[in-house]
Amino acid sequence: MRILIIGGGGREHALAWKLAREHTVYACPGNPGIAQVAECIVGDPLSTAIQVRPDLVVIGPENPLIEGLADRMRVEGLTVFGPGADGAQHEASKAFSKTLMQEAGVPTAPFSIHTDAASARMAAKARFDAGQSVAVKASGAALGKGVVVCDTYEEADDAIAMMLEDRDLGEAGDTVVIEDRLRGREFSLLSVVSGTEFVSLPVAQDYKRALDGDRGPNTGGMGTYSPVAKVDDDLVRKAEDRIVRPMLVAMKDHGIDYHGVLFSGVMVVDGEPMCLEYNVRFGDPETQTVMRRLGPGLGELLYAAAKGQPLPTVSVDVPSAVTVVLASSGYPGGYAKGVPISIPVDLDESVVVFHAGTADALRESPAPEISNLRTNHRGEGEFVSAGGRVLGVSATGATVAEARARAYAAADRIAFEGKMLRRDIAAEQ
Ligand SMILES: Nc1ncnc2c1ncn2[C@@H]1O[C@H](COP(=O)(O)OP(=O)(O)OP(=O)(O)O)[C@@H](O)[C@H]1O
Ligand SMILES: [Mg+2]
């Protein structure tokens, strides 16, 4: 098949790496890492798809999905893996998503929806008075900054003011969800969905906080590992039965014909799975780890899901994988760009370095300086940083511990100024 991937981050590199083993892959816009396995085309995604006419389009990030790119592509007769704007409302509106969860009987934290600060404060106050703490959530897409988990009423009060009065998050914060705070272990379940049919991929654990020991600010994700021993098959089956399947049926009842990934954010409360949220795309960096474990046939699975055909299964051939994210110093706050990256060519053969935020050094920097960076090591001096999360160093192994040791050994040999990484990815399973 000829497959076009929309996006240019670590998730899209992992998808391209996997799919390019069996198919011809194009990416729009792609990145320098993706360019090693696919043809990258910079341009408008819709025009590019119309021009390339691939057998399958896979849309990576949530924003184009929210904006209806999948719908516009389908109108052009393209076969697309990714929900339309109707299904993508799970990420555009937490109020929509929570309401549908409630209707579908999906176990989730009790909640209320508010558009004025006074009623939001009353709801938060009532919960704290009843001995319960809360999470205050901007309903709209807020780039991971829209959720404040509060220990005290004062924190909730501040979060409500920030969203509804100061409008720090703009429109995304015009509607707020106040929900009970849950406590437990979290995991992400990625399901490849075609209408009400689905196939779940292996579970991966991610690390959202910037610093070791789950301290520091939330990030897009600092690392992942799979399998997750504490999330056994029984728990996954419960999550599928209570969280994935009923939501697909509810969407169908609302006329939403969903073809794409449904990512369930699950919290295990007293041994039972509860739904924190749904996302409508592959998780990043979870995907970087999951792709390393799958056997052949992912392209066929995504194609069948896009077409509404019976879903084939994909075997899990590799026992374990660990991905460690290398970020720019300062991330998730401000960070430098254009920093030269050195990646040795003789990394362990179990290692794949996924590019999340890189650019071609020659294109991005003034030529004279770059010529000094060129060395006889292919790979060294070719790339510069272009994002907060720069690389995902992904290794496989017979065990998580083995994959972890290989990932860190490689991560330590990759150099760029300000390189920041967590040291405890997959340390405790
Ligand atoms: N009810 C809750 N109780 C406790 N913690 C919560 C609750 N809701 C959310 N959280 C915490 O906040 C994190 C982010 O919440 P949520 O997944 O709803 O936000 P998001 O911004 O859509 O995240 P993502 O970027 O992963 O899509 C969760 O992973 C969880 O750690
Ligand atoms: Mg989300």
Image (cartoon, rainbow, N blue to C red):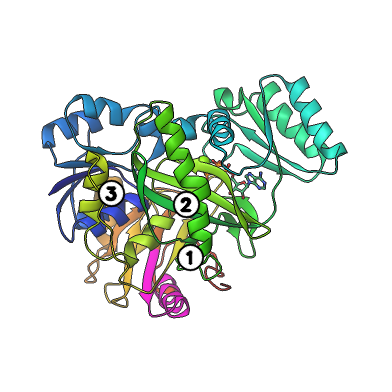
First in residue order: circle 3 vs circle 2:
3
Q: Tell whether circle 2 marks a residue whose Cβ is less than 8 angstroms from ligand 1.
A: no
Q: CA distance from mark 2 to mark 1?
A: 10 Å
First in residue order: circle 2 vs circle 1:
1
In the rendered image, residue 142, in percent from the top left (x then y), is placed at: 54, 34
- Does residue 313 appear in the picture of this structure? yes
In the rendered image, residue 155, in percent from the top left (x then y), is placed at: 78, 39
Magenta span contains residue 405: yes
Q: Quadrant of ligand 1?
A: top right
Between 328 and 309, the one lying in front of the other is 309
Identify residue for label 1: 233
Could you tell me which secondary element the residue under label 2 belongs to?
A: helix
Query: In front of the other: label 3 or label 2?
Result: 2
State the residue at coordinates (50%, 42%): 278
Three-letter amino acid code at the position of disc 1: Asp
Q: Main secondary structure of the magenta part?
A: helix
Identify residue for label 2: 240
Graded by Cα atoms within 10 Å as few (under 14), some (14 to 19) or many (20 or more), the crowding at tag 3 reads many
Q: Give the image quarter of residue 133.
A: top right
Q: How many marks?
A: 3
In the rendered image, residue 224, in percent from the top left (x then y), is placed at: 47, 62
Query: In front of the other: label 3 or label 1?
Result: 1
Could you tell me which secondary element the residue under label 1 belongs to?
A: helix
Q: Is residue 144 above or below residue 416?
A: above
Graded by Cα atoms within 10 Å as few (under 14), some (14 to 19) or many (20 or more), the crowding at tag 2 reads many
Between 260 and 194, the one lying in front of the other is 194
Give the magenta range: 393-411
Three-letter amino acid code at the position of disc 2: Glu
- Does residue 220 appear in the picture of this structure? no
